[in-house]
């Protein structure tokens, strides 16, 4: 099964997650893709392929003869794409032998991926890149990971290996990917997510993450008689946001620096709503960030009256370093595999999260490997064909029996 052909089929399915839906999967397209991937796994000879009611796809390769005592290794990627940008009617195109210049995605709409904005593009000169028409995201996060795992499973049929388990999950982008994953069905000793990142990226640190929803209850009257009476919910919402540290926003932070990110806002004079994501690699600082949100709500309730501001937080996942720091053999296996493929590992803390965060805390060590793309979650998203091919080789090297 051709790697790029599979990837292009997968991105044709709109699998945007919907954060406002309680069901899993949150969108019907994820069921469609789940069945497509399950059919591909069956076609290449995987065993025990199933799709459950929540669109989790499971499949297996039993250990090769004489390899029964080797550890069983899992590989995971997610079906959904970010809700930030549409994934409907994706029109991918391949740039053969990229020349290092600006990439015009859509001349009519003047959508251009400019090297001055994304200087890392120059390192892809001479490579083949897959991009969009500038109207949608591509979906390499994480359909590149799915395609790479499926291709690696196909290759491993003819290479001695221990047990191999694969799982493709729904709704990772909205924090639910690992919540209903059955680790008894996905039976392995440790696993790797293939999710986002460039070729050679290896991450075993993630943010501690929470979502926060803030509701502002105002009091609206005719503006002509509003003096001393009106409480404009939109204005109070702006005041709430101004109380958060101005420099601690995603656009001003990097590395292990945490942030508050206002992701959505809506409202009128009577009711306003703010949605945030809260992130920090340090658990103590993470707790303090949530405290800052609640303190701001308390201050405004004292100022405008009890019940004016209602703030709620929900933890989504925690930094998997707390677990993986004692599972160095899992990390070393990936490092050695990359080096055997001629790739120098780029070990970095993930400024995000993966299904591996939750799974590591459930007892399944699960660091993350980059899939070879860039500019995820936006219309400038792309992926390098050669990076995808090399990532397949890394998966095979991780899984195959030692010589």
Image: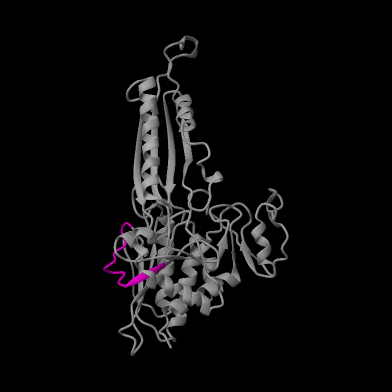
Magenta segment includes 180? yes
Q: Is residue 60 above or below residue 141?
A: below
- Closest to the observer: 205 or 101? 205
Q: Residue at x 32, y 62 (%)?
A: 181
Q: Is residue 87 above or below residue 347?
A: above
Q: Is residue 381 above or below residue 4?
A: above
**Residue 132 visible to the viewer:** yes
**What range of the chain is rendered magenta?**
179-192
260 sits to left or right of 47: right
Q: Position of residue 276 (x, y in %)?
A: 44, 41
- State which quadrant residue 295 falls in: top left
Instruction: Give the overall secondary structure of the magenta segment.
Output: loop
**Residue 12 visible to the viewer:** no
- Closest to the observer: 336 or 141? 336
Magenta segment includes 76? no
Q: Residue at x 51, y 53 (%)?
A: 255
39 sits to left or right of 10: left
Q: Quadrant of the C terminus?
A: bottom left
Q: Position of residue 396 (x, y in %)?
A: 46, 78
Q: How is the model colour-coded?
A: one colour
């Amino acid at each position: 099964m051709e790697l790029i052909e599979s990837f292009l089929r997968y991105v044709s399915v709109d699998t945007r997650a919907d954060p406002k839906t309680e069901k899993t999967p949150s969108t019907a397209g994820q069921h469609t893709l789940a069945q497509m991937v399950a059919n591909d796994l069956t076609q290449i000879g995987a065993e025990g392929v199933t799709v459950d009611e929540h669109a989790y796809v499971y499949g297996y390769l039993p250990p090769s003869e004489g390899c029964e005592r080797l550890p069983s290794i899992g590989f995971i990627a997610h079906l959904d794409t970010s809700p930030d940008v549409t994934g409907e009617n994706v029109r991918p195109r391949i740039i053969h032998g990229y020349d290092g210049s600006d990439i015009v995605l859509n001349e009519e709409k003047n959508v251009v991926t400019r090297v001055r904005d994304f200087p890392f593009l120059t390192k892809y000169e001479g490579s083949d890149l897959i991009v969009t028409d500038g109207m949608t995201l591509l979906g390499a996060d994480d359909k590149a990971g799915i395609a790479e795992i499926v291709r690696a499973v196909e290759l491993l049929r003819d290479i001695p290996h221990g047990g191999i388990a694969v799982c493709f999950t729904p709704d990772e982008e909205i924090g639910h990917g690992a919540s209903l994953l059955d680790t008894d069905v996905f039976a392995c000793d440790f696993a790797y997510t293939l999710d986002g990142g460039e070729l050679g990226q290896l991450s075993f640190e993630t943010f501690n993450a929470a979502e926060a929803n803030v509701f502002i209850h105002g009091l609206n009257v005719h503006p002509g008689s509003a003096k001393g009476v009106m409480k404009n919910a939109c204005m109070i919402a702006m005041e709430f946001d101004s109380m958060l540290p101005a420099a601690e926003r995603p656009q001003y932070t990097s590395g292990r620096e945490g942030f508050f990110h206002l992701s959505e806002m809506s409202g009128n004079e009577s009711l306003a709503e703010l949605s945030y994501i809260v992130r920090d690699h340090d658990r103590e600082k993470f707790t303090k960030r949530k405290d800052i949100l609640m303190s701001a709500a308390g201050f405004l309730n004292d100022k405008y009256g009890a019940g004016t501001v209602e703030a709620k937080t929900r933890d989504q996942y925690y930094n998997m370093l707390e677990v993986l720091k004692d599972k160095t053999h899992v990390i070393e296996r990936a490092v050695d595999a990359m080096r055997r493929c001629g790739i120098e590992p780029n070990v970095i803390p993930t400024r995000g999260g993966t299904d591996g965060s939750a799974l590591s805390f459930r007892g399944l060590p699960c660091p993350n490997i980059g899939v070879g793309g860039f500019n995820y979650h936006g219309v400038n998203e792309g992926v390098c064909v050669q990076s995808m091919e090399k990532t397949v080789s890394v998966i095979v090297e991780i899984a195959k029996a030692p010589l």
